[in-house]
Image (cartoon, grey):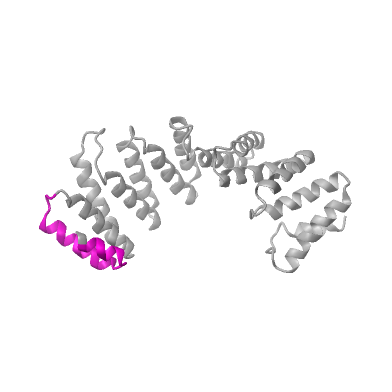
Amino acid sequence: SLVGSEMCIRDRFSEAAELFRRALESHPKSGNATESAYMEALSHFDAGQKEDAAARFLSLYEKLEEQGADEGAEVPYLLDSGQMYARLLGEADKVEEADQMWERLSRRFANSQSLDGILDAWAYLNLKHGRYERSDQIYRQLLEKFPDSRHAGLARLSLAESEMDANRLDTALLEFTAIAMKPEYGAAERESALYHMIDIHAAQREWQNVLKYGKTFAEQFSNSNHAPNVQLLYAEALLDQQDYAAAKEILSMLRKAVIEEALPADSWTERILSLIHI
């Protein structure tokens, strides 16, 4: 529907949804019927009518899945409608239903190049809702099937964090190091991995490594939210090396940032005061 598309351009999504519905009702077998059905669902979504959108995405998905019963068949809008339905279930905190829908998509598109994206979204749903065993299971599946995927960095980072949470620090450290040193991974994954590396080295009182990787962090991620915490660990390493002047300079800068509320007070910032008087 050209008029429906015009309504979308003008952000009149409820009107657009009705126009797409009428077009579909008037011409259910036309070449544009599937597109009209998808655009109707998408217009409801853009209008904030999430339940209506979810119902229509699911209806379209099931209809297209039946049409493309051959597992290898590429059916336009099949994956798009299924992913939108799964995401809407997740947004509505229907986590178990969303998990089942992502699993259904992973089976339907088991031989598709889109599978790594499906696995990533499925794992992230579970990660976001604290279902770590489930997310780990799916991330391992992603890495096994797609070791060079653009989602591989996040998958490895999440699995390494699980190792860290289980107090398997040596295993976690090896993985964090590998992630941080792999330029093909995204900056966010490398930043988090490098921060965890420094934190583990500090916990193990390996101060030379804290200095080494703390400098790398400052060079690569100076604007990171983790930067002040890394600076504190770096100052602690300097104190171990008896470089009191350099340590005090960093600690004084951090203390000033806390006093001026440029750096939010937190449990870890209390350590600034205890170190500055050493």
Q: Which residue appears at 88% of the width and 53% of the height?
A: 245
Residue 3 appears at what percent x and percent y?
21, 63
Residue 229 appears at what percent x and percent y?
70, 53
258 with respect to 82 (left or right) = right
- Image: 182 above or below 2: above
Q: What residue range appears in magenta?
A: 3-30
Quadrant of image for the C terminus: bottom right
Assess whether residue 152 is covered by the magenta stretch.
no
Residue 119 appears at what percent x and percent y?
41, 40
Taking depth in this image into account, of 104 and 17 the one nearest to the observer is 17
Q: How many marks?
A: 0
Q: Which residue appears at 59% of the width and 36% of the height?
A: 182
222 with respect to 64 (left or right) = right
Q: Main secondary structure of the magenta part?
A: helix
Assess whether residue 5 is covered by the magenta stretch.
yes
Q: Which residue appears at 69% of the width and 63% of the height?
A: 263
79 with respect to 260 (left or right) = left
Quadrant of image for the N terminus: bottom left
Residue 275 appears at what percent x and percent y?
82, 55
